[in-house]
Amino acid sequence: MGLVYLHSSMSDSRQWRPLAQDFPGLLHDFYGYGEAPMAPAGPFSLALEAARIALNEPMTLVGHSYGAATALHLAVTQPDKVKALCLYEPVAFWLLPKENAGRQAAEDLGARMARLDASQGAQAFVDYWSGEGSFAAMPARLQQRLAAQAPKVLKDFEALIGESTDPAAITVPLLLMVGSQSPASSRAVAFELARRLPQAQLVEVDAGHMGPIQHPELVLPLMADFLKRYG
């Protein structure tokens, strides 16, 4: 099994099933999502999140958003166990200067969620990444499920803002995808990564931050081409 799939916040490993049908691998659920246990109490970090991902051999990591940021963490901390990276918009906000407007917008979102109740926090999160009104347009059952995940999203933000790993040492092949319609925060991270990692293949897609889920017809074929070579 040479592939590990890492999902975004407020999602779970099922988001990767369409791609995994042709490229089988480990479909991992992060703490608090899917079939995974709740996150432990106390301070939270990407190191704690990544400790549940067993890389027993060199593997290709496929990640989206929070999952892509975790993949970067693994590539830095376990370089001998990562052979390639296939990433859509890693939310590695720690790579941006504190005064960067995109980083400030992401930190403001996390701070705003912390002040809201679970339902309002979920709405703020969904509407930031998918556009104003996206949460209101969802079925009530889905709204309730996402609201239940809002506390874990706060831990995700804590992990991302508190991270300090430097990806400059990453040398493995990297497909780095960015949506042309995405918020400035995640676009800024993608372009900063491309600047730091000259081997990165930067591909812009006519989609938003949730491209792998909302526009799989645009995103997954590009990932599939990469996995044919490095999966």
Image: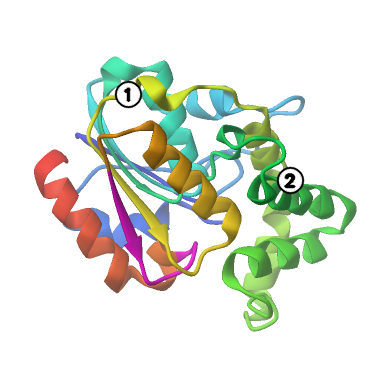
Q: Where is residue 210 in the image (x, y as percent from the top left)?
A: 48, 64
Residue identifier under label 2: 107
Mark 2 residue type? Glu
Q: Where is residue 146 in the image (x, y as percent from the top left)?
A: 66, 62
Does any portion of residue 185 appear in the rendered image? Answer: yes
Q: Distance between the residues labelled 1 and 2?
A: 31 Å
In the displayed structure, would residue 106 be above or below residue 50?
Answer: below
Point out which mark residue 55 bears. 1
Q: Which of marks 1 and 2 is in front?
A: 2
Q: Which of marks 1 and 2 is nearer the N terminus?
A: 1
The reply to whether the magenta stretch includes residue 209 is yes
Magenta-drawn segment: 201-210
What's the residue at 35%, 54% (across, down)? 177
Foreground of the two, 172 or 27: 172
**SS class, disc 2:** helix
Splitting the image into 4 quarters, where does residue 184 fall?
A: bottom right
Q: Where is residue 33 in the image (x, y as percent from the top left)?
A: 56, 48
Q: Where is residue 22 in the image (x, y as percent from the top left)?
A: 16, 56
What's the residue at 42%, 32% (across, down)? 72
Point out which mark residue 99 bears. none
Where is the C terminus found, in terms of image quarters? top left
